[in-house]
Amino acid sequence: MAPLPTSRERILESARNAFVERGLVSASIGDVSASAGASVGSIYHHFEGKEGLAAEVYTEALADFQRAFADAVTSATAAEDGVRAGVKTVLRWCLRDEPEAAQFLLTASDAARGPAEDRVRELNREFFARVVGWWKPHVKQGAVRELDLDLIAAIWLGPSLEYCRMRLTGRTRVAHRRAERALADAAWNALRNEGER
């Protein structure tokens, strides 16, 4: 039996839901308080207001996404398996496991991440160190291309995140399985070394 969520966890879940449903600007501390069954005072105690709450929702979602992606990729031995696992994990996390968190990450990032810029930088540093640590040996083996980190992220994550954004906002009906196959093929074809073609 799973433990009951703490007051802090209830507040974060209620805030995430309110931000997704009403938007970051329109959702109020009162909305979060009512939904979480927590006093406004306890919200300010834990998060120092709406900006701090939004920043915490953002960083928790980002950390969970990055952990899931890095765990899936770094557990793969072959480069192709890792690239494909990364795409599969993006789609699974965004569309099945954590759709509310994904929607918040994909729509509220600039407004929410501002107060958490230092924490976001730290999370990104740890995340990219793990992924690059897995990537570099595959470059040396000739399996994948040597590219700037920003290009790797854009090619590998960009199309899958855009598909997730379209699915979460109801702008595409392309089936998940079909998209996963096509996006994983595209990522591998774009990232593998020319000699691997």
Image (cartoon, rainbow, N blue to C red):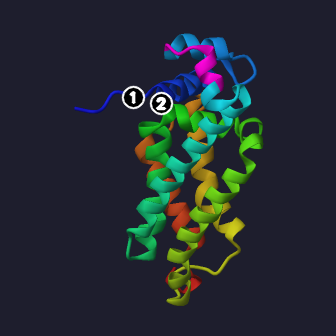
Q: Which residues are magenta?
A: 37-44
- Disc sitting over residue 9 in the figure: 2
Whether residue 21 is visible here, answered yes or no, is no
Which of the pair 109/87 is nearer the observer? 109
Q: Position of residue 102 (x, y in %)?
A: 56, 38
The N terminus appears in which quarter of the rendering?
Answer: top left
Q: Residue 140 is drawn in which quadrant?
A: bottom right
Q: CA distance from mark 1 to mark 2?
A: 6 Å
Q: Position of residue 59 (x, y in %)?
A: 61, 44
- Residue 123 in magenta stretch: no
Q: Which amino acid, by three-letter code, is at mark 1?
A: Pro
Q: Which amino acid, by three-letter code, is at mark 2?
A: Glu
Circle 2 packing at 10 Å, graded few (<14), some (14-19), many (20+), is few
- Residue at 53% across / 24% down in the picture? 11
Please tell me whether residue 72 is drawn above or below residue 93 in the rendered image. below
Instruction: Tell whether 191 sits left or right of 83.
Output: right
- Residue 43 in magenta stretch: yes
- Residue at 68% across / 76% down in the picture? 147
Under tag 2, what secondary structure?
A: helix
Q: Position of residue 12 (x, y in %)?
A: 54, 29
**Total numbered badges shown on the rendered structure:** 2
Please tell me whether residue 179 is drawn above or below residue 7 in the rendered image. below
- Disc sitting over residue 5 in the figure: 1
